[in-house]
Image (cartoon, grey):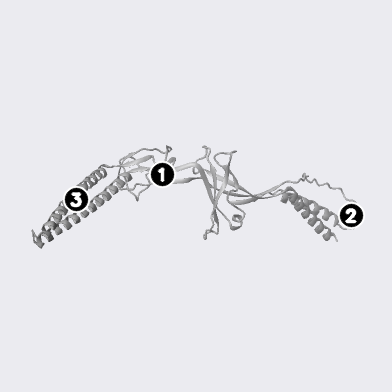
Amino acid sequence: MRSLVSRSLVTLILVSGVALTLSACREAEPTAAAAAPVAEHRVDVPALTVGAADLESTLQISGNLAPRTRVAIFAKLPGTLSHVAVEIGDRVHAGQAIATMDRREIDAQVDAAVAAVNVAHAGVESSEAALANAIIEHERAQKLFDTGAIAKQRLDAADTTRRSASAQRDLAKASVAQAEAALRRAREVQRDATLTSPIDGVVVERNYDAGSLASPGDKPVAVVADLRVLKLEAGVSELEAGRLHTGMPARISVQARPGETFDGRLAAIAPEVDARNRHFAIEVRTSNPGSLLSGMYATATIPLDALSGEETTASFLSVLRDLAAGSSASRH
């Protein structure tokens, strides 16, 4: 990374300074030597056409192009890959299946969870029937007790049976909730057995074949990158960061595409300096017309504040006046 400033003004100043210096040296020769006949020597000085022009200050950063979005897809479960559906370079869309784990055991667990839910629902129906019967028996016992046909002990037994049936009904409902939770978990595991792409993009990495063992701690099964927008990241000094703002245009040249330039924008400036090198991270993004690839070496040129032609001329004349004044002082 380096900051470049046009050298035209410096070149003109150097040429003018050389000319003034030669003139001063000739006038400073002793008068006695001037009286003596000497051979005339001519010195050819290259002439430059002086004109007003804008001087542009630019900032250049270099690095490798990278996709704006790059997602590694890992296995969520340990197991054997039964099918890998993509190859490197394939285009995929969000939600598309990338690979599938062996699901035979997982499917069996889902079936068992479904059966457990059905059993739990049957238990609720049975407990509700028992509760309804207990309520009827308790009401009958209450009427008989009120007429004095049965003892208080019979009424208390009917009430105990009713309360027990109610508790059994509540327990059966809790069992249904528990079985349904187990079924949801089993179905989540079943879904995790199918690896899908979370974004639209291109497969840039594929690390496994069908029949391979994969687990969450291993390499990603595949990597998908969105190459529609590429980014170039670099670090700039504190002084350079102070002259930048998001949205500034950038011209991007790529080593592998000589003669071509691509329009970009300064998309992000880190709000905090990196304590290791005192640099601020910046990110330049460009739309990919289809000819750029991730990893290509590129250089981004960001125009900074420009010096107008009038300001350039004024600065040049001021420097010439200072040189002339210094030459005159040396002669006196």
The residue closer to the viewer here, 271 or 230, is: 271
Q: Are marks 3 and 2 in contact (CB under 8 Å)?
A: no
SS type, badge 2:
helix
Query: Which dot marks residue 316?
Result: none
In the rendered structure, the answer to whether residue 62 lies left or right of residue 36 reads left
Task: Name the image quarter holding residue 105.
Answer: top left
Residue 127 image offset from top left, x and y in percent? 18, 51
- The amino acid type of the residue labelled 3 equals Glu
- The amino acid type of the residue labelled 2 equals Ala
In the rendered structure, the answer to whether residue 232 lies left or right of residue 317 reads left
Query: Which dot marks residue 198?
Result: 1
- The amino acid type of the residue labelled 1 equals Pro
SS type, badge 3:
helix
Residue located at (54% from left, 51% from top): 268
Point out the tag, 1 or 2, that comes first from the N-terminus: 2
Point out the tag, 3 or 2, that comes first from the N-terminus: 2
Residue under label 2: 34
The extreme right residue here reads 35
Residue located at (75% from left, 46% from top): 52
The span from disc 1 to disc 2 (Cα, nearest Å) is: 89 Å
Which quadrant would the C terminus be assigned to in this image?
A: bottom right
Residue 171 image offset from top left, x and y in percent? 21, 54
In the rendered structure, the answer to whether residue 130 lies left or right of residue 302 reads left
Q: Is residue 326 visible to the viewer in this orientation of the structure?
A: yes
The residue closer to the viewer here, 189 or 49, is: 189
Residue under label 3: 128
The residue closer to the viewer here, 223 or 139, is: 139
SS type, badge 1:
loop
Point out the tag, 1 or 3, that comes first from the N-terminus: 3
The span from disc 3 to disc 2 (Cα, nearest Å) is: 132 Å
Residue 210 image offset from top left, x and y in percent? 32, 39
